[in-house]
Amino acid sequence: MNIEIKKSKKPVKYETALKFMETRLLEIHNNKSNELIWILEHEDIYTAGTSYKENEIIDKSIKILKTNRGGKITHHGPGQLICYFVIDLKKRNKDIRKFISSIERTIINTIKSYNINTFADKKNIGIWYNDKFETKKIAAIGVRISRWIAYHGFSININNNLTKYQSIVPCGIRDKGITNLKKIVDQDYSNLQNKLIDNFLINLRN
């Protein structure tokens, strides 16, 4: 299993990342390149997936970038870890559900290593945390599949600015909140990306 691991230290523009993934997808389809796991951050940007609705934009003055990923509207910005991938599902029995489950397990197990318990929800995609008063999203998942190759990825909120979510209905869900790891437990998460990559590789093999 040859998967390239790419880590970007400086923020990457959303359009640049998307173009890179789409190029890699074609290269994988033509057996000219390896699969990819890419860790990065974006500068502040709101993106809308293919199933978003206009009434999920609360602040009409914000700019929304429409994308071809699944899902609804979310925010990316500093303090949020992005894990993009380009993974060939033809090598994995074309099992989309199993692949999504492997992403969920990767996030849950990585966060659990910091003594924080989170969970997946069949009705609302993403990874969730139960605090005393409500269920809050800690990680978002948005995947697109083309030619049986999965791309786009997921994001984990570490110490990002949560007020940015007040301008939208995050992921189209009105009755749940958004949180980040620093708000749950203020500890050192500097090694989270390495743990995440290790867990993702394990789950992709299983």
Image (spheres, rainbow, N blue to C red):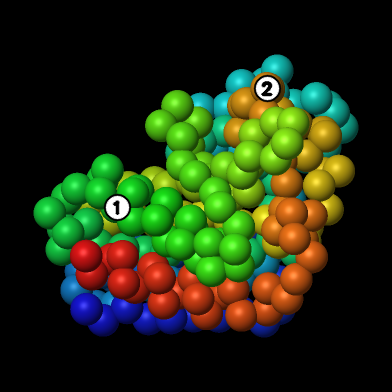
Quadrant location, the C terminus: bottom left
Q: Residue at x 22, y 78 (%)?
A: 1
Question: Pointer 1: what residue?
Answer: 99
Q: On the rendered structure, is 141 left or right of 26?
A: right
**Spot occupied by residue 31 in the image (x, y as percentages of width and height):** 19, 74
Alpha-carbon neighbours of circle 2 within 10 Å: few (<14), some, or many (≥20)? few
Q: Amino acid at mark 2?
A: Asp
Q: Residue at x 32, y 78 (%)?
A: 3
Question: In which quadrant of the rendered view does residue 203 lie?
Answer: bottom left
Q: On the rendered structure, is 63 left or right of 135?
A: right
**Spot occupied by residue 93 in the image (x, y as percentages of width and height):** 12, 54
Whether residue 146 is visible:
no
In depth, the one of 158 and 29 nearer the eye is 158
Helix, strand, or loop for circle 2?
loop
**Spot occupied by residue 195 in the image (x, y as percentages of width and height):** 50, 76
In depth, the one of 58 and 124 nearer the eye is 124
Label annotation for residue 175: 2
Whether residue 203 is visible:
yes
Residue 191 higher or lower than 17, as above or below = below
Is mark 2 in CB contact (under 8 Å) with mark 1?
A: no
The mark total stands at 2
Q: Amino acid at mark 1?
A: Phe
Q: CA distance from mark 2 to mark 1?
A: 27 Å
Which of the marked residues, 2 or 1, is nearer the chain's N terminus? 1
Q: On the rendered structure, is 116 left or right of 33?
A: right
Q: Residue at x 62, y 27 (%)?
A: 172
Helix, strand, or loop for circle 1?
helix
Q: Nearer the viewer, mark 2 or mark 1?
A: 2
Question: In which quadrant of the rendered view does residue 199 lie?
Answer: bottom left
**Spot occupied by residue 77 in the image (x, y as percentages of width and height):** 75, 58
Question: In which quadrant of the rendered view does residue 175 lie?
Answer: top right
Spot the residue most to the top. Answer: 55
